[in-house]
Image (tube, rainbow, N blue to C red):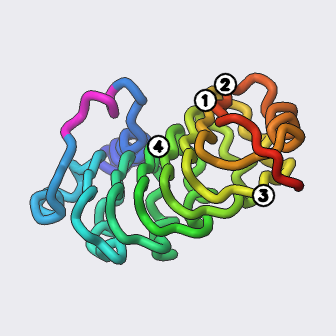
Amino acid sequence: MRLVLLALLLGPVTASAQLLPPTTLDSIKTYHSLESALKEPDQVYRLDLSRKKLKQVPEEVRKLKNLNALDLGHNKLKELPGWMNELQYMQEFSAPKNRFTAMPNSVCQWKHLRRLDLHQNQITGLPACMGGLKELYSLDLWSNDLGDFPKEISGMSALKFMDLRVIQFSQEEMDRITELLPSVKIYFSQPCNCAN
């Protein structure tokens, strides 16, 4: 009976330990090889698979249940697999210089996401569901093909920084985005004379 009680008491502590405090996450070991990560999957909180010429995310990443930060930058990815929704502790996701044309669906499922970097892709718009990312602090989307900013993005209440440089917006659209996110520092390039 004591063991059962102890297991019940310790259970939530073990589960909550998988979501690291941001200061801990910043200083924790980064795995740069999937092979080494898979040797101790429960110890992997930060994984860097950038510059690996990936055309798809390796399914083995699915085994890293405690993953809090993932870098997939400088690859050839066009989409993320549906199983990435299972990575519920994701706080930092970086995939610049890939081939995304739409925001990956998984992004809206990562409720603890704090930093999102998808610069230099071909993303054409943001989905309304991103308004549910209440912990998102930094959003880097410079040099995409963004045209659609739904009003729901105003729900990103923790957002402080958003980079939208090297994207053609009219002054009217820039004003509208700024009104949706009045407390966010937004970086724009010069407005274009394009008609919206």
Most foreground residue, 90 or 116:
116
Residue designated by label 4: 91
Question: What is the C-alpha distance between the residues marked 2 and 1?
Answer: 5 Å
Does residue 94 appear in the picture of this structure? yes
Front label number (4 vs 1): 1
Count of numbered badges drawn on the protein: 4
Q: Amino acid under label 1?
A: Phe
Tag 2–tag 1 contact (CB < 8 Å) = yes
Most foreground residue, 194 or 180:
194
Question: What is the C-alpha distance between the residues marked 4 and 1?
Answer: 16 Å
Q: Quadrant of residue 12?
A: top left
Front label number (3 vs 1): 3
Q: Quadrant of residue 126?
A: bottom right
Question: Which numbered marker is on residue 148?
Answer: 3
Q: Which circle's residue, 2 or 3, is located before the other in the chain?
A: 3
Question: Which numbered marker is on residue 185?
Answer: 2
* Extreme residue toward the front, this view: 193
Which secondary structure dominates the residues rendered in magenta?
A: helix
The magenta stretch spans which residues? 24-29
Q: Which circle's residue, 3 or 1, is located before the other in the chain?
A: 3
Question: What is the C-alpha distance between the residues marked 4 and 2?
Answer: 20 Å
Circle 4 — which element?
A: loop
Sort mark 3 into few (<14), some (14-19) or many (20+) by Cα contacts within 10 Å.
Answer: few
Circle 2 — which element?
A: strand
Residue designated by label 1: 161
